[in-house]
């Protein structure tokens, strides 16, 4: 994953939604959604539920 994709992944894991991620990173919601789509593709996740589950699991193992 790119640095920005990893940043979005971590923020998803911390419980932020796409709107909050966009505000935090100062990017549009559509850009956040594009990053989410690329993350799903790269991690071979089949749906949005899996996209939320994986970062949460990762965040539990790597809290900040």
Image (spheres, rainbow, N blue to C red):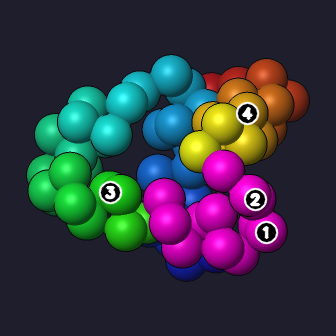
* Mark 4 lies on residue: 53
- CB atoms at circles 2 and 1 under 8 Å apart? yes
Identify whether 29 is placed above or below 58: below
Which of the two discs, 3 and 1, sits closer to the camera? 1
- Which labelled disc corresponds to residue 45? 2
Q: How far apart are marks 4 and 1 (CA)?
A: 13 Å
* Mark 3 lies on residue: 32
Residue 59 in view:
no
Q: Distance between the residues labelled 3 and 2?
A: 17 Å
Which residue sits furthest front?
A: 47
Q: Does the magenta stretch include residue 5?
A: no
Identify the residue at image location x=75%, y=59%: 45
Q: Is mark 2 on a helix, strand or loop?
A: loop
Which of the two discs, 3 and 2, sits closer to the camera? 2
User: Which is more N-terminal, label 4 or label 2?
Assistant: 2
Name the quadrant containing residue 59: top right
| The residue stretch that appears in magenta | 36-47
* Mark 1 lies on residue: 44
Q: Distance between the residues labelled 2 and 4?
A: 10 Å
Percent coordinates x, y for residue 50 in the rendering = 73, 42
Q: Distance between the residues labelled 2 and 1?
A: 4 Å
């Amino acid at each position: 994953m790119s640095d920005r994709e990893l940043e979005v992944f971590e923020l998803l894991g911390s419980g932020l939604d796409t709107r909050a991620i966009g505000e935090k990173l100062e990017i549009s919601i559509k850009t956040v959604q594009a990053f989410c789509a690329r993350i799903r593709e790269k991690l071979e996740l089949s749906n949005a539920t899996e996209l939320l589950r994986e970062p949460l699991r990762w965040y539990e193992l790597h809290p900040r």
